Structures are given as C-alpha cells and as structure tokens.
Image (cartoon, rainbow, N blue to C red):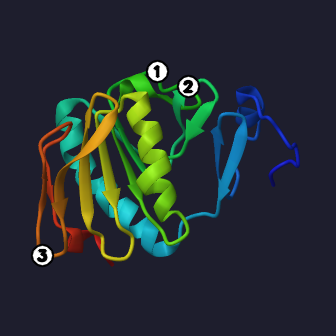
Amino acid sequence: MIPTNHGPWAEEEYLALNETDDRVELVDGSLYVSPSPDVRHQFIASRLAGLLHQTAQTKALYVFGASGLRLRPGRIVIPDIVITSSFDFAVVVAPVEATRLVCEITSPSNEAHDNVLKMHYYAKAGIPWYLLVEHKTATLRLFRLVGTTYFPHAVAEPGQALRISEPVTVQIRPEDLLP
C-alpha cells in the first residue's frame, strides 16, 4: 500500500517503499501508480523478452522485465522491457547509462502516457532505441534517438516482421507475441 504522503517524494522515500503489487514510478517528486498489467500484456512482454534475450546474450547485453530504471536523480520509471550493457547488479535500479533499448507495451489506460510522456523522458535521458508495442494488435514501432528526439525507424503490423539490428539483431513478427 502506498503511503498518503502528499509529496514531494524524495528518491530515498520512494526506494524505501520496496516492492508493491502496483507499478509505482517516481517522476520529479510525484508518484505515478498503475495497476499491474493484465494477462495479455504480461504474455506479450514475456514472449518479447524471450525473443530479445536470445540475441542479447550473444552481444553481452541483458534483458530485464518491469524493473526500475533511473533516468536521472528523482526520476525512476518501470519500462516493460529494458536491454542494458553490464552494470553493477547489486544496485536497486538500473542506470540509464547502461540502457540501450526500452520497450513499453501500451494498454488502454496508459496509451498516451507511453506514446508521449515516457517517450519524451526516455529521449531526454539519451536512450538510443525505444520499442513501442500496441497492446491490442501487437503492432511494433521502433524509434531511433536523433539528438534528443525519437524518430520512427521501423514498423511491423501483424503479417509483417520487424527487423532490429541494434542493439540486438532479431526479427519479430507481431503475431508471435500474441496468445
């Protein structure tokens, strides 16, 4: 259960919450609480993480699901999937400096949040690649960072394949992610 502190929240207070049933993110002194993702969302995340993991290990990269990611002091978010290079795994949250790709799977309740706000945060933090998966159709949208802005790099709808060459090399068909 989240305390009723009206904020602003310090990073130390946020980290003291430990694990909860909800997704709790810290953004500039405010807590953003989302319910746990539904079964379909979790299925897509699991299948996608498995596909990414197959080639990530060949490049000495790591794939994490739903882990805290520090974008900057006071801004800790929880992407659905993160690909990183090696870092000190004893830390509580992953450092943005090691992050190569983040993935968000949209849901009806967070579509605008992932398409606009989180994309902006990830771009400002300098994460080179952003993969967006549309919950209903599993359409895949890969964005590449240029400066501090993401630009569309590739799209795959069901019946097509998304080819990713950086930071991992993989081909993903949206229908392979659906139950």
Label 2 neighbour load within 10 Å: few <14, some 14-19, many 20+: few
Disc 2 marks which residue?
91
Q: Residue at x 37, y 25 (%)?
A: 98
Disc 1 marks which residue?
88
Disc 2, disc 3: CB below 8 Å? no
Q: Residue at x 38, y 60 (%)?
A: 46
Measure the C-alpha gap from mark 1 to mark 3.
40 Å
Disc 2, disc 1: CB below 8 Å? yes
Q: Which mark is residue 159?
A: 3
Amino acid carrying mark 2 in the image = Val
Label 1 neighbour load within 10 Å: few <14, some 14-19, many 20+: few
Measure the C-alpha gap from mark 2 to mark 1.
6 Å
Q: Quadrant of residue 47?
A: bottom left
Measure the C-alpha gap from mark 2 to mark 3.
40 Å
**Residue 168 location (% of width, % of height):** 18, 40
User: Which secondary structure lies at badge 3?
Assistant: loop
**Residue 40 location (% of width, % of height):** 43, 74
Label 3 neighbour load within 10 Å: few <14, some 14-19, many 20+: few
Viewer-nearest of discs 2 and 3: 3
Which part of the image, by quadrant, shows the N terminus?
Answer: bottom right
Q: Residue at x 17, y 36 (%)?
A: 58
Question: Which badge, 2 or 3, is on the more N-terminal residue?
Answer: 2
